[in-house]
Amino acid sequence: MTKEEVHIDEVLEPILRQVPDPEIPVLSILDLGVVREARLDGKKASVKITPTYSGCPAMDVIGDDIVTALKQAGFEAKVDLILAPAWSTDWITETGRKALEDYGIAPPMDASADKRALLGEEKLVKCPQCKSTNTHLVSQFGSTACKALFKCDDCQEPFDYFKCLI
Amino acid sequence: MSSKQKDTRLHEDKIKYIYGIADNSLILGQRLGELTGHGPTLETDIALTNISLDLFGQVRSYFQYAAQISSGEVTEDDLAFLRTEREYLNVLLVEQPNTNFAYTIGRQFLFDHFHILLMTELQKSKDDTLVAIAKKSIKEVSYHKRFSSDWVKRLGDGTQESKEKMQTAINDLWRFTDELFHTTKADEAMIKAGIGVDVKQLKDTYYKNVSEVLEEATLEVPNLKYFQKGGKEGIHSEQMGYILSDMQYMQRTYPGMKW
């Protein structure tokens, strides 16, 4: 399954777009790319979501939020968790990347740049505050499983970097 | 044996095989979880507990699957919290205590290098669910391996004191590495069925990869003839009882409790 093959029912789409990631409220779950299917049969909605990281504690909350949002819109929802195909940062949409950066989280880079940055070989991660790439890795693991902690050496601000997962 | 009996046997072996993989992550995750708020620095504290979280996430996927194919009303929580010591099939390595930071890193390093090889091979399994879990997990495990290998190098090639401590930890934990490549009867049945990974085949690559990192860390690769075993058959070291009493206390005191 690829991004293009994801089927989201057009009636459900605007409702799901209103459901945010609980850890990153500026990011809709659709832009995060965790919704793999949303189908509607009369008043019954069936939604399939996939975790970003296996142990992501946000998944249960996302599931509950989807049920609540759809219930308010008059639908009875059933949410299933699926594992395949595994989520990667490529599933985050362009809108999502922009939202992350505006929020102060550096969006994921491509895999080879990510590896060089995380190994400290090159300064590639752009500070979301001052846009400088004069930044360094503080910790490979940040405030949540999906982020690493960086610091900008120009504006001196620490910031989260959304790790690339391929 | 009738074909129905054979099916039942294969089914039971599969559940045991899943325990064998999942219990490693469960017990190691529990060990790392003990460090919550006690890591040597804020960054390592967060890193180790993030790794713990990844491992628990993987465990949930395995146990949900095992519960689903088990007969009777079994839940993932029953499997995690209500088995007896002999029913846990994790290797001895993962139950070893957080003696000091070098031991925590050494244990993680020796396990991660095995874990990544296992996940790579499990992606070729004939079982679709195990393939999906492996594909998901390997992304996380490669981060774990990078973290633990970096720390082995940093401590090994660090000060005289950090080097001594790292070497002592590696020397001490080395005797638990051979067991990673043992197979149980259930493992053999699963290998034959094309579902399980033949870990015996991973041994050479493992020791080669681990030795490379140790050499880069200017540490000596232990030369040991005698190894410990038993965990995979449910015969654990003294440490296991303490872990289980910690881990199972709430569920045994308040059966069926939920957050």
Image: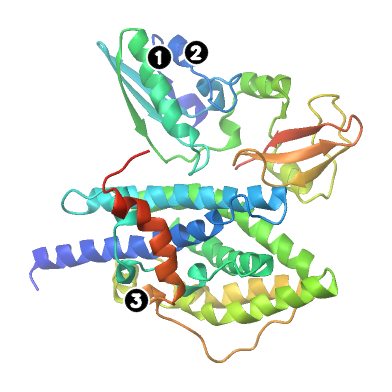
Asked whether the viewer can see residue A98, the reply is: yes
Can residue B125 be seen by looking at this rendering? Answer: no
Circles 2, 1 touching at the beta carbon (< 8 Å):
yes
Instruction: Determine whether, in the image, residue B49 is placed left or right of residue A110.
Output: left
Query: How far is mark 2 from mark 3, CA to CA?
Result: 50 Å
- Image spot of residue B213 (x, y percent): 71, 70
Which quadrant is home to the C terminus of chain B? Answer: top left
- Report the chain holding disc 1: A
Residue A91 got which mark? none
Residue placed farthest to the bottom in the image? Answer: B225
- Could you say which is closer to the camera, residue B130 or residue B22? B22
Quadrant of the rendered image containing residue A50 = top left
Q: Position of residue A166 (x, y in %)?
A: 60, 43
- Mark 3 is on which residue type? Glu
The image quadrant that residue B224 belongs to is: bottom right
At x 18%, y 67%, the residue is B9
Query: Can you say which quadrant of the picture contains the N terminus of chain B?
Result: bottom left
Task: Identify which residue is drawn at 59% across, 64% down.
Answer: B108
Residue A70 rendering spot, x and y as whole percentages: 36, 14
**Alpha-carbon distance for marks 1 and 3?**
48 Å
Looking at the image, which residue is at 61% across and 42% down? A165
Q: Which residue is mark 2?
A: A18
Q: Callout 2: few (<14), some (14-19), or many (20+) C-alpha neighbours within 10 Å?
A: some
Looking at the image, is mark 2 or mark 1 earlier in the sequence? Answer: 2
- Which residue is at a point 79% across and 36% down the rendered structure image? A125
- Which amino acid lies under the numbered mark 1 shown in the image of this protein? Ala
Q: Residue under circle 1?
A: A69
The dot on residue B233 is 3
Q: Amino acid at mark 2?
A: Gln
How far apart are labels 2 and 1 at the CA level? 8 Å
